[in-house]
Amino acid sequence: MIEINIGAMVESHGQEVGRIERVILDRNSYEATHLVIRHGSPLHTRHIVMPVSWIAGSGHDRVRIERSESDINGLPNFEMQHYVSLDHLDEEQWEHPRSLIRPTDWINYFVPLVANAFGDPFHTQGVVVTNQLLSATESAIGRGLPVESNDEHKLGEVQEVLLSEPDWRLSGIVIARGFVLTHPLRIPGDWIALIQRDRIVLNRTKQQFEDWAKEQ
């Protein structure tokens, strides 16, 4: 079993490549397909998508790959941004339901609005839309993703993702509980009923979970 500690270092040939930001899973098979890696310098950071098949070994605080710099630089970005005019925004959400519009992206709406007010008809109002490089059946699990019981009580937040070898199937997650003095709990993979964009839902009630947690 491989423990993927979100935030752990990724290294290749003894050199740090980046830090793990997310684990991408297929929601149907619960198989991990890629890792999202924060790569580059603080002034030029990319979030790249790396196949899990590149993993040559792992420890608690690092994942080892054996790839050249050109291989790593050739990986695609996790997020792609493009400008969408307001009259095509509904079409964008229909074609790409996982698209995001961040609060800061609305500046691209107000700038053309001001330009139009001063007689510039060539700037159409719109926003910048961010698309994540995910298929319709994939979800990206990041540190801090809430974990809830099936009766809608928050139980903790994701800290690590546990994968089995060689199929890279999800075998469990480690969650952190508490606010100041947090403590980890390892949740079996067969307890996971649903993986969504903003949460993971277990197939246990809050009471069932608490009774089990007391025995750990």
Image (spheres, rainbow, N blue to C red):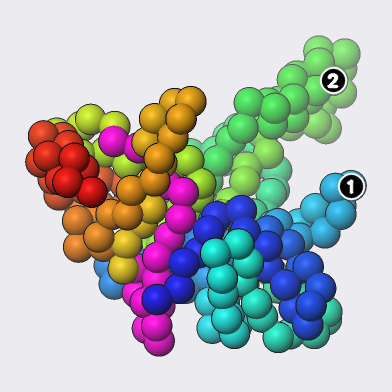
Q: Which of marks 1 and 2 is nearer the N terminus?
A: 1
Residue situated in front as seen by the camera: 71 or 80 = 71
Residue 37 location in percent, x, y?
A: 66, 61
Percent coordinates x, y for residue 133 in the rendering: 56, 61
Q: Residue 18: x and y, percent?
A: 73, 62
Identify the residue under disc 2.
Answer: 115
As for residue 6 lying within the magenta part, the answer is no
Say if residue 70 shows up in the picture.
Answer: yes
Residue at 78 percent of width and 82 percent of height: 13
In the rendered structure, the answer to whether residue 159 lies left or right of residue 150 reads: right
- The front one of 44 and 168 is 168
Query: Which quarter of the picture shows residue 139?
Result: bottom left
Q: Residue at x 29, y 36 (%)?
A: 155
Q: What label does residue 43 carry, if any?
A: 1
Q: What residue type is labelled 1?
A: Leu
Q: Quadrant of the N terminus?
A: bottom left
Instruction: Give the main secondary structure, helix, strand or loop, of the magenta stretch.
Output: strand
Expressed as whole percent of the image width and height from the top left, the position of residue 29 reads: 29, 72
Residue 164 magenta-highlighted = yes
> Which region is colored magenta?
155-170
Query: Toward the viewer: 8 or 46?
Result: 8
- Circle 2 packing at 10 Å, graded few (<14), some (14-19), many (20+), is some
Distance of label 1 from label 2 (alpha carbons):
31 Å
Decide if residue 128 is on the left or right side of residue 55.
right
Furthest residue to the front?
A: 215
Any part of residue 150 in sight: no
Describe the element under mark 1 as helix, strand or loop. loop
- Left or right relative to 189: residue 107: right
Q: Residue at x 70, y 43 (%)?
A: 83
